[in-house]
Image: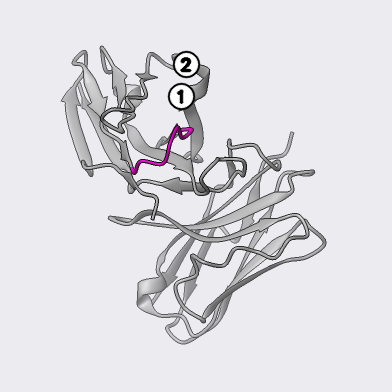
Amino acid sequence: AQRVTQPEKLLSVFKGAPVELKCNYSYSGSPELFWYVQYSRQRLQLLLRHISRESIKGFTADLNKGETSFHLKKPFAQEEDSAMYYCARPRNYGGSQGNLIFGKGTKLSVKP
Amino acid sequence: GAGVSQSPSNKVTEKGKDVELRCDPISGHTALYWYRQSLGQGLEFLIYFQGNSAPDKSGLPSDRFSAERTGGSVSTLTIQRTQQEDSAVYLCASNLRGAHEQYFGPGTRLTVT
């Protein structure tokens, strides 16, 4: 079965420190991978996708096929980054459909 | 434009009662998803509708859970004989066929007492 693993339920860092939220996926060729974010009292929303290779709000994520990882990184965390982060991949191999598998999520807390 | 809407925003019910949760997707979105979000379990997939195809019900946790989508638009998730472990936030999302970005609603917080 395809899986997305986020090993940390909670990650706490101080403002200005680097942050890395871990995500590993079960191997199935070259998947598409995504990070979704849910800020307090807001809807879950797409943060970034690996295929676009973009940086959003200072966050980047690199697909490492050898380690089957897609860790989310930011060099200097801000208090407003505090949120719940979910890693996701298409449910079906080939990824032609929009159905996604989500990890269990990591709650990031950035302290002043 | 209008996003995904869900109602009610909060629902408190007694154990054993049936509840209906509603989702109104973005107009024109052919795909609709239901998830359950709870502490420690993350986002649990429940059911997926895509156009006129048979829904993917593989995530429904028991036969007490069912969902339908009328006219390819509004969807209702029904939980019969609710149990305390059904307490969670139920999220609905929609998107266009083949697109991976899902647009989420605000959720319905269900509390079973």
Majority SS type along the magenta span: loop
* Marks 1, 2 in one chain: yes
Secondary element under disc 2, as helix, strand or loop, is: loop
Closer to the camera, B32 or B10? B32
Circles 1 and 2: CB atoms closer than 8 Å: yes
The answer to which quarter of the image holds residue A55 is: top left
x and y percent of residue A26 in the render? 34, 44
Write down the residue under mark 1.
A50
Write down the residue under mark 2.
A53
Distance from the alpha carbon under mark 1 to that under mark 2: 5 Å
x and y percent of residue A75 in the render? 26, 12
Closer to the camera, B86 or B33? B33
Secondary element under disc 1, as helix, strand or loop, is: helix
Q: Residues within 10 Å of mark 2 (few under 14, many from 20)?
A: few
- Whether A27 is among the magenta residues is yes
State which region is magenta. Answer: A26-35
Q: Is residue B12 shown left or right of residue A8?
A: right
Residue drawn where x is 36% and y is 21% of the image: A61
